[in-house]
Amino acid sequence: MITFHRVKVDDYYKVLSIRSPEDVYEGYDYLPDRFHKLISSSSTEGYAASIDNEFVAFQLVNLLDDGRTVLKKAARVAKEYEGTGIYNALDSFTQQKYHLLGRQRTFSFDAHNQTLMKRLYARKMETVMPRDVTAYNLKSPREVLKNNTTRPNNNNNTIFPVHLKEVFKSEKMCSELFPEGRMLCFYVPYKLKDSNIPLIYYQGTKVLGSVTEGSLLVTAGTSFRCSKGHIFVLDVYGTLNNAFVQHLLQHFRHVDLRFVNEPMEINIHCMDSENQYITDAMRQLDIQRDESFRDVHHVATTEMNWKYLIQ
């Protein structure tokens, strides 16, 4: 007998027992490090499928854009129940809860997700935000800062929530920074609404901005720990220029103290990961590119009937 129910903070170990973190997202599973933070957010709800009181499937749902957009993330199913329809049953259960008039389902995934890529190729979904993803490795943020010979930028480039609110109000700045009408931050695509701003910062994300010769550059950095180690996700918007290296240094100065002396992998999400300014900045800071890592991240939406998507 399958039962479906909301997941609480105390269900941490039950959720993680469904699947080994090393077996999720190729080892880049952020859920163990972020579960309590995510499940405590008013915009996030977790649901599980149980058999005989044992969790066998799980799905995390983000409610964005004043609740008008539903984003499914952090999904998993126990290996022994793969292909049995258990996860589809859980997915249908959550769909029924959120299938209200005017709500749109959004998907955020990389090219390794074969199920969603097949739906994309079949034109059951439409990509609204493609992003190149490249990876770089460094010994530790503190080591980079210690060895850096670049004169520190004394300007505080931090964009606080009140500042981001002003950016969202400016049609000119939004057209330059966010031409797709969304800000992808730590895998979550936010429309440019004031109600989304607290959610952008909730995960401890640091947002920086600078203006160079009239061109805008915004970077948003978020850290998490997973089986691969310490991962730093950097979302890049606007015009890349010489200020990018200063953005990196400022992000490193604010890395969580848990990670400051640890090796770190930087995953850069941007429109053009081969941009010369990224290459030059990494070379200047002696940060090595992981040549074996190259990915494409998609944000896709659908206006179609939700049930059609799981056929």
Image: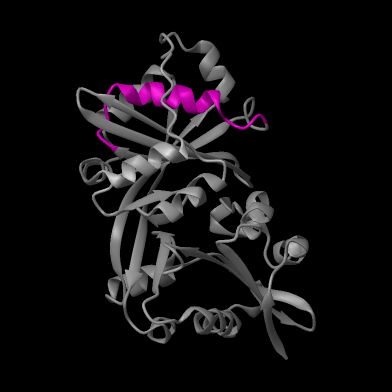
Residue at 41% from the left image edge and 69% from the top image edge: 68
Task: Please name the residue shown 20% across and 42% down the image.
Answer: 172
Q: Residue furthest bottom?
A: 1
Q: Please provide percent x and percent y for residue 51.
A: 74, 83
The quadrant where residue 90 appears: bottom right
Question: Magenta segment, which residues?
Answer: 238-257
Out of 84 and 148, give the one closest to the viewer.
Answer: 148
Check if residue 266 falls in the magenta segment. Answer: no
Colour treatment of the image: one colour
**What is the x, y in percent for residue 32?**
67, 53
Tell me which corner region of the image, top left, top right, bottom left or bottom right, holds residue 107. bottom left
Viewer-nearest residue: 163 or 3: 163
Q: Position of residue 88 (x, y in %)?
A: 54, 82
- Image height check: is 164 above or below 46? above
Q: Name which residue lies at 32% across and 70% down.
A: 120
Instruction: In the rendered view, tell whether residue 13 sits above or below residue 79.
Output: above
Q: Position of residue 268 (x, y in %)?
A: 40, 40
Number of numbered discs overlaid on the protein picture:
0
Left or right position of 181 against 161: left
Name the quarter where the C terminus is drawn: bottom left
Is residue 168 visible from the viewing direction of this image? yes
Whether 99 is drawn above or below 135: the answer is below
Vertical relation: 143 (above or below) 20: above
Quarter of the image with the N terminus is: bottom right
In the foreground, 216 or 243: 216
Q: Is residue 171 left or right of residue 201?
A: left
111 displayed left or right of 261: left
Is residue 267 among the parts visible in the rendering?
no
Nearer to me, 118 or 259: 259
